[in-house]
Image (spheres, rainbow, N blue to C red):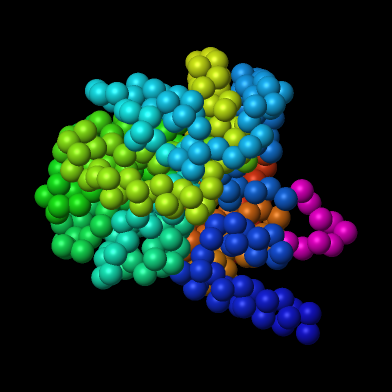
Amino acid sequence: MENMGSQTNISFQTKQVETFTNITIKGILGLLMDNIDGGEDKREVISLGIGDPTAHSCFHTTDAAKEAVVESLLLDKFNGYSPSSGLPIARKAIANYLSRDLPYDLSPEDVYVTSGCTQAIEIAVSILAKPNSNILLPRPGFPTYLLCAAFRNVEVRYYDLLPQNNWQVDLKAIEDLADQNTIAIVVINPGNPCGNVYSYDHLEKIAETAKKVKTLIIADEVYGHLAFGENPFISMGLFSSITPILTLGSLSKRWLIPGWRLGWFVINDPNCIFKSPKIVERIKKYCDIGGGPATFIQAAVPKIIESTKEDFFRNTLKMLKKNSDICYEKIQDISCINCPYRSQGSMVLMVKLNLTLLKDISDDIDFCFKLAKEESVLLLPGTAVGLKNWLRITFAVEPSFLEEGLSRLKSFCLRHSNTKIIN
């Protein structure tokens, strides 16, 4: 009876996860966590499922960032409400920071300070939404875009990222999918969940394709500058003379402070094709509704950006590169999992399950629930990011923690291996 109850629980959870428009990464990981066996032999839980590295000492933020916040708080000047669009000093600092990657200078008026990148996504989709509109999202991608589109009754159309081609965008698919009601193409670079970093040439082709189909680009650069492979990070805003770019980002990932919730929504539109008084007014209204980050955090932004040394960024990239290599190499020893692409950026990579080499595993969701229960290891099922029978692995953890998690993953796969096929 106990086993039957467990199976019923997994079936119920699987049904929940497969309701795609209700998916959140935290929600799925919460269900997986609930499925972990809490008996006497309980092992430490190893989460390789969420992009929050702050639990690990090798991924702590710089002292400069902490000192900036303490100083801001102690000044006792930033305890009240901030302007809806953000503190002027924060907007100016973000504009200057992003302008380093552009051939022109952004105005502080082009910058809206948001509560993390999540609110920036919500604002972008909300201001563009209109009756009968559609938005083009990458598959695999980040599920928050789907959720925001569903709330605004915007139809979602998926274009594929091609694993055999370093997860590049299927440009032909974009041309086929777009029509006069397409409000935007979402491009995530560096990639989540694939760990890809696009070249200058590919980004230019994406911008040219957007121009061809007469739409703009939402450039999700929350992992901006977290590139440690062959391609350097290049901001999509570099191509805003081709088509308007709405750039979304935050301090969360590069500064390792996701809980500070300091993000931005930026209009890159030097030709003023998209920007208009009406659009600006709509953005300000949405900022009024949602509010922004804590005022004292905003006040610390100039010093956080100015005082952070390059050594901090280099050390972060060095650790991410090391862990990416560990992940890729260890997965080569697991026969039922294939990794078509070594992560070049962000903190994640995608791997494909070969279910024919496994017994008693029906799909990626079943795999992740059983892995959590048997090994206390959390991975994100690919279904959550739009790719069934794949897995997303987050490697922004202590190297020893990562190796232990991958060792348990290998043990799980061996225990469930279909020995008849392997032999």
Can residue 220 be seen from the camera position used here?
A: yes
Q: Nearer the viewer, residue 392 or 362?
A: 392
> Residue 63 occupies which quadrant of the picture?
top right
Instruction: Tell whether position 40 is magenta.
Output: yes
Magenta segment boundaries in residue numbering: 36-44
Q: Position of residue 11 (x, y in %)?
A: 61, 78
Left or right, 233 with reference to 380: left
Report the residue that reaches farthest toward the left.
212
> Residue 55 occupies which quadrant of the picture?
top right
Left or right, 143 with reference to 12: left
Q: Position of residue 21 (x, y in %)?
A: 46, 69
Q: Quadrant of the N terminus?
A: bottom right
Q: Nearer the viewer, residue 317 or 68?
A: 68
Can residue 66 be seen from the camera position used here?
A: no
Q: Height in image: 383 above or below 1?
A: above
- The residue at 54%/26% (across/down) is 301
Q: Height in image: 174 above or below 295?
A: below
Q: Nearer the viewer, residue 268 or 235?
A: 268
- The residue at 65%/27% (across/down) is 77
Report the residue that reaches farthest toward the bottom.
1
Q: Height in image: 9 above or below 409?
A: below
- The residue at 42%/52% (across/down) is 285
Instruction: Tell whether position 395 is magenta.
Output: no
Left or right, 351 with reference to 27: left
Main secondary structure found in the magenta portion? loop
Q: Position of residue 35 (x, y in %)?
A: 70, 65
